[in-house]
Amino acid sequence: MEMEQVVAYRICATRFVLRCWDPNEADALRHAVADSRDHLRPWMPWVKDEMEPLDDVVQRMRRFRANFDLDKDYVYGIFDTTEQEVCGSSGLHRRGGDKSLEVGYWIRKDLVGHGLGTEVAAALTKVAFEVNLACRVGIHCDVANAPSAAIARRLGFVQEGVLRQRMRRRDGTLRDEMIWTLLADEYERSPARAAAVKAYDILGRRVL
């Protein structure tokens, strides 16, 4: 008998809450992106020069929720503990095959440099292994993105290599991408295992 899929819709930590986006938060998200545009542009090709139309962001959030419910992809908003302030966005992405997940994240510009990215990545890594029962978790980043590489290294991820000319920049040129991974048997030694987080399913039942 196949084991029922368990999904964390809500992840709570000391400084933040990660949860599935709601389309009514589209305006807050687009303002957070706009406020961080210059900070995000070098690493996030999807960041536009102008603030996105509200309806476009609403439609993207609807896709986020649909993919979440269908177990295709898990995009989480990053909120403060009151859940009134958007601090960034993150996700567990099914891009590496069976039992493999990729951690992604961006932090609002004014909150960068205070360890929030590391804490979010640690929380998602813990959920990936302990709730999603992943065998392998990855972090991909531009070779020039030293802060993201530092987060992966800090959490015990191993750099497997560099994919040359893998990702396309906004101007159409290609960039190299670092691949960092953590395997299930390495997770026990990762600082992510000690992350103080609680996770809940769609009905609010605790799963971690």
Image (spheres, rainbow, N blue to C red):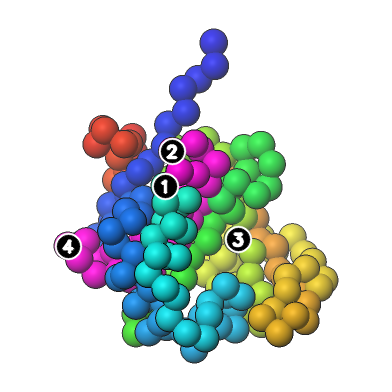
Q: Which residues are magenta?
A: 66-92
Q: Tell me if label 2 and label 1 are in contact, CB under 8 Å.
A: yes
Identify the image quadrant of residue 169: bottom right
Which is in the foreground here, disc 3 or disc 2? 2
| Picture coordinates of residue 187, whole percent (x, y) | 54, 47
| Secondary structure beneath label 1 | helix
> What label does residue 69 carry, if any?
2
Q: Give the residue displayed 46% in from the left and 70% down from the top.
A: 106
Measure how far apart labels 3 and 2 are at the Cα level. Answer: 23 Å
Residue 179 seen from this side: yes
Measure how far apart labels 4 and 1 are at the Cα level. Answer: 21 Å
| Secondary structure beneath label 4 | loop
Q: Give the residue displayed 36% in from the left and 76% down from the top.
A: 32
Position of residue 124 relative to residue 97, above or below, is below
Q: Tell me if label 3 and label 2 are in contact, CB under 8 Å.
A: no
Q: Residues within 10 Å of mark 2 (few under 14, many from 20)?
A: some
Position of residue 205 relative to residue 89, above or below, is above
Residue named by callout 4: 82
Residue named by callout 1: 65
Q: Residues within 10 Å of mark 1 (few under 14, many from 20)?
A: many
Which is in the foreground here, disc 4 or disc 1? 1
Measure how far apart labels 4 and 3 are at the Cα level. Answer: 28 Å
Measure how far apart labels 4 and 2 are at the Cα level. Answer: 24 Å
Q: Give the residue displayed 50% in from the left and 20% down from the top.
A: 3
Q: What residue type is disc 2 on?
A: Asp
| Picture coordinates of residue 127, whole percent (x, y) | 43, 45
Identify the image quadrant of residue 52: bottom left
